[in-house]
Image (cartoon, coloured by chain):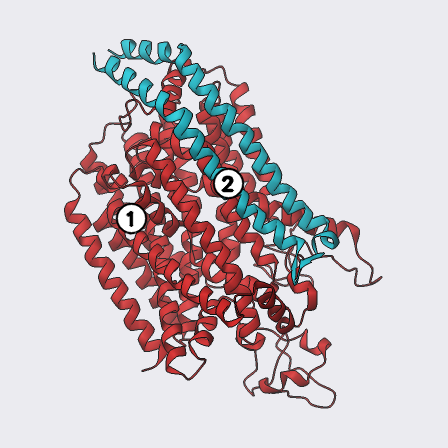
Amino acid sequence: MSSKNEQVWSDTQASPEFQDLKRKFRGFAFPLTVAFLVWYFLYVILTAFAREWVSTPVVGNINIAFILGLLQFATTFLIMWLYERHSSHSLDGPSDALRDKVDKELAK
Amino acid sequence: MSSSMLSTILFIAFVAFTLVLVFRAGRSNKKSSDFYDGGGSFSGFQNGLAIAGDYMSAASFLGIAGTIALFGYDGFLYSIGFLVAWLVALLLIAEPLRNSGRFTMGDVLAFRMKQRPVRGAAATSTLVVSIFYLMAQMVGAGALVSLLLGISDPSAKNWIIGGVGILMIIYVTVGGMKGTTYVQIVKAFLLMTGAILMTVMVLWHFGFNVSDLLGAARDASGKGDAFLQPGLKFGKDIIDPVTMAIDPVKTLVSKLDLISLGMALVLGTAGLPHILIRFYTVPTSKAARKSVNWAIGNIGAFYLMTIALGFGAAALVSRVTLLRGFKVDLNGCLIDAKGAAIVNGDVACTPLDHVKDLTPELKALLVPVDPSGNVAAPQLAQFLGGGEGTTGGAVMLAVIGAIAFATILAVVAGLTLASSSSFAHDLYANVIKRGNATAEQEVRVAKISAVVIGGISILLAIGAQGLNVAFLVAIAFAIAASGNLPAVLYSLFWKNFNTRGAVWSIYGGLFSAVILLVFSPNVTGLPTSLIPLVEGGVRFDFFPLANPGLVSIPLGFLFGWLGTITSNERNLAKYAELEVRSMTGAAIGKAVQH
C-alpha cells in the first residue's frame, strides 16, 4: 500500500506536467519575492540613510518619504493582483488536473 | 450617562453577542478535529476577514496611531512593514501550507522528518511566540481599561486582565476554531467601520485635503518639518554630549536598528503560528490564496487609514492630552524622571497647567504619563464627536474604546487557540503519545491546555504590566522571523532539508533572538531598560541593537543550512510526496503516513 503510494508520488514528481507546473510557480513567485524584498529594504534604507533627499517636498506638505511609503502600498496591491492573475490563468488548471489524477491513482 | 459607562455597556453587548455566536459554533462542531480547523469549510472571504481580525491587534490600532500622533512619519514605517509582510505569506506560504498540513505549523515542519524532535521544537517556538504576543495584548488591555474607564487602581487592572483571560479561554474551549473565527470576523467588521468613520470625519475636517491635514499636524506638533520626515523615533542621529557633534558610530548603530526592525516586521508575519493555522480553515489552496487577498485588502486599507488617524490626532488633539499630561508629585508639582520637582528660576513648584511657561530645556525634563500615546485614537474619537463634556464626544469615545477591547479579545483568542492546538497536536499526540492518541483525547488535551495557557498568561501579564507593549510585540515578531520562517521555507522548498536542519533552525533562530534581546539595551544599559541604568548598577548590554532581527534571522537560516549539510539523513521519497501535495492539493487534509 504504502510503497504503491510512494510510487505515485515520485512518478508524479518526475512527470513533465508536474515539472512544468513547478517551474511556472517558482519562475513567477521567487523573482517577485526577491523584487518586493529589495524594493522594501531600499525604502527602509532610504528612510534611514537618505533623510535629506526623502524630506524633499513634492506636493504641498507631502514629501518623497510619503510618496515612497504610499508606493509600497501600491506595489503590494499590484503584486497581489499580478499573482492572482498568474495563478488563475496558468497554475490553477494544471494543478487541479494533477490533483485529480493523483487522487484517482491513490484510490486504486 | 458618562462615556465610561456607555463604553462598558457597549463592550458587554459585544461580549454577549460573541458568546452567543461561540456557543452556537460549539454546538455545531461535529468532528473533534473541528476544534483545530473549524471543519475547514470557511470561504476565502470569511477567512480573509478573520485573518484581518486575528492580525490587526491593539498594537496596530492604538500603537501605530499613537506613534504617528507623537513621532509623526516614523509610525507609518510600522504600517508599511506590517502590510508588505503579507506578500511573503501570499507568494510562498499560504497555498503550500494549506495543501500539505492539517492543523498546526508543526504538521508541515515534521512532514518528512523524525516526528518527535521536530514537533517538540515546533511546539516550543509556537508556545514562546504566542505567549509573548499574548502578554503584549493583555498588558495592553489592562492599560487601555485604566485609560478609558479612568481606573488607576492596580487591583482593578488585574481584574480586567483576568477577565480578558477568562473570556478568551471560554471562546477557545467552547467554540474552538469556528467560534474564534466568528469573533474575529465580527471584530474585523467593527474595527474597519470605526476606522472608516473616523477617517472620513478627519478628512472632512480638512476639506479632504491630505496636505492640509499633514500641515496642521506639523504645526501642532511643535517639531516643525521634522514631524513629517523620518527620524524622530527610529534611526535617530546621536549627538555626543561632550563635543556636541554627531557620533558616527552610535548613529550608524541607531540606523541599523531601524533596518533590523524593518526586517523583523516584514519577515515575522509569515512565521506567526496563529496566522499560519488560519490557512487550514479553508478547504483548498485556492481559497487560502483568496483569503490572503481579502486580508491584504482589509489590512492595507486599515493601515492607510492610520495616516489619517495618527496625523489627525496630532493635528486636532493637544499634545499634553495625547501624553495624558505630565507626572506630578503629591503636592501637584511637575517632576522630572528622578521624581525631583522642576525648579523654574525661583519657582520651586510648577503646577501642571503652567507647563507652557517652562523653557524648552525644562520641558524636556518632564515625564509624560503615557509616553507611547496609546490613547491617541480614542482621544481623537472624543474630539471628532464634539469634544470632552459633550454627548457626541462621550459616545464616540465609548464606541472606539469598545472596539479597541473587541480587538484585543479577538487576537488573544486566536493566540490561545494556536498555542493549545500546537500543545495537543504536536507535543501531546506526537511527542508524548508517539502518534497513538485518539482525536477525542487530543481535543480534550487541547481544551485543558487552553485553560492552562490562558491561566499562565494571566499571571505573566499581571507580572509584566511595567513592560512596554511594543517591545513585547517586537520580541514575538523577531522570534517568529528567526525561529519559524527559515524552517517553514526550507521545509517547503529545499529538497535536502532534514531533521537536524529543522531542529537547529528552530532552536538556533529562537535562542539567537532571545539571547541577543537579553544582552540588548532593552534589558540593561539605558534609563528606560527593563533594569534601568543607575550609577554602579549592573549592565550587560553587549549587543547594541534593540531589535535582534538583523542578526538572528540570518542565523536562523544559517543554523538550518548547517544542520542539514552536517547530517546524512535524506528523505527524498517523502519530499516527493510533500512537493506534489503542496503544489496540487492531492490527498488534502489527510495525515502523513510515517
Q: Which residue is under mark 2? A: A78
Q: Which of the pair B585/B308 is nearer the observer?
A: B308
Instruction: Give me the chain letter of mark 1.
Output: B
Looking at the rendered structure, the secondary structure element under dot 2 is helix
Residue B510, visible in the rendered structure: no
Quarter of the image where one finds residue A40: top right
Q: Mark 2 lies on which chain?
A: A
Question: What is the CA distance from the residue labelled 2 to the residue labelled 1?
Answer: 28 Å
Give the chain coloured cyan.
A
Residue at 54% from the left image edge and 85% from the top image edge: B330
Query: Relative to the observer, which residue lies in front, B421 or B387?
Result: B387
Crowding near pointer 1: few (<14 within 10 Å), some, many (20+)?
A: many
Residue A107 appears in the rendering:
yes
Q: Determine whether B475 is above or below B466 in the image.
A: above
Image coordinates for residue B489, horizontal then vertical, percent: 48, 30
Q: Chain B is drawn in which colour?
A: red
**Image quadrant occupied by the N terminus of chain B:** bottom left
Lateral position of residue B252 relative to residue B132, left or right:
right
Q: How far from the left and from the top, in percent, is residue B256? A: 67, 46
Tell me the kind of residue under disc 2. Answer: Leu
Q: In which quarter of the image is residue B68?
A: bottom right
Q: What residue type is labelled 1?
A: Thr
Quarter location, residue B278: top left
Is residue B357 shown left or right of residue B498? right
Q: Which residue corresponds to mark 1?
A: B181
Secondary structure beneath dot 1 equals helix
Disc number lying in front (2 or 1): 2
Q: Which of A62 and B313 is in front in this view?
A: A62
